[in-house]
Image (cartoon, rainbow, N blue to C red):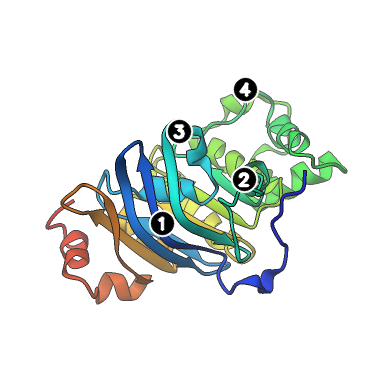
Amino acid sequence: MENHLTNDPQASQYAIESSKVDIFYGSFRAVKDCSLQVLPRKITAIIGPSGCGKSTVLRSFNRMNDFIPGCRVEGEILFHGQNIYAPEVDPVQVRKLIGMVFQKPNPFPKSIYENIAWGARINGISGNMDDLVEETLVKAALWEEVKDDLKKSALALSGGQQQRLCIARALAVKPEIILMDEPCSALDPIATLKIEDLMRELSANYTIIIVTHNMQQAARASDYTAFFTMDPDRSGIMVEYGDTSQLFTRPRDQRTEDYITGRFG
């Protein structure tokens, strides 16, 4: 199917850009007036207290909210200069180009090999699957640990290995952007550092947007940070967005300072 998304990287200086976005669940406005410009091949973190719309915003970037009954998005989310919510755009194609890794590792109940190969095949990827499996597992820093056990069930891997396998599975369909929704929240500290190191390596070729409750992780692993909080009407709003080191050391908004110093949240 024609995806109606141009492959012209010059169409915009941003990897993805939201413009005056409101997100509703039924009549409730969960996110209000979100305008966020994400730079390519950088790591952007979204932080803020529970319930402020971080994951809702993240899911809007590849239309995962389409699966939630009653959810609607107003405003524009521009990818290659085109609104991904335009009626002619195929959301399946959007999700190929903008992949997602979830909070809890969710490998298919298949072998390590088939997690990559089957996922690629159902997304229309053809060619030498052995090469694709090796290439993506190398990129996900998992190849050396599993290369002799590719027929083993993915469910037998540790939590950290499963999450890296899910990242490899996302890479197999050749996305441009990888969304990560608290990818380390279920992992131990050593596995968390491996994921952070992997994110840094991947950011040479991919744009990464991560939602995290862990402020230290945002400070360590991201180039840019967006801070969200709740309005009095309980709508999520973006308070501040900028270079991570600046936001954590010299925040421009008092609400940001209050959050990162632990006064609330």
Quickly name the residue at label 2.
Answer: 95
Where does label 3 land, which residue?
Answer: 68
Name the secondary structure under disc 2. helix
Instruction: Please tell me whether mark 1 or mark 2 is closer to you in this view.
Output: 1
Quadrant housing the N terminus: top right
Marks 3 and 1, Cα distance to the nearest angstrom? 17 Å
Left or right of residue 92, residue 197 in this image: left
Q: CA distance from mark 1 to mark 4?
A: 37 Å
Spatial CA span between label 3 and label 2: 16 Å
* x 31%, y 45%: residue: 30
Which mark's residue is nearer the viewer, 3 or 2? 3
For discs 3 and 4, the disc positioned in front in the rendered view: 3
Can see residue 78?
yes
**Residue 177: percent from left, percent from top:** 59, 56
- Which residue is nearer to you in this view: 251 or 86? 86
- Who comes first in sequence, dot 3 or dot 2? 3
Q: Secondary structure at mark 4?
A: loop
Q: Which mark is residue 109?
A: 4
Expressed as whole percent of the image width and height from the top left, the position of residue 156 reads: 58, 25
Distance, label 1 to label 2, CA atoms, is 19 Å
* In this rendering, the label closer to the viewer, 2 or 4: 2
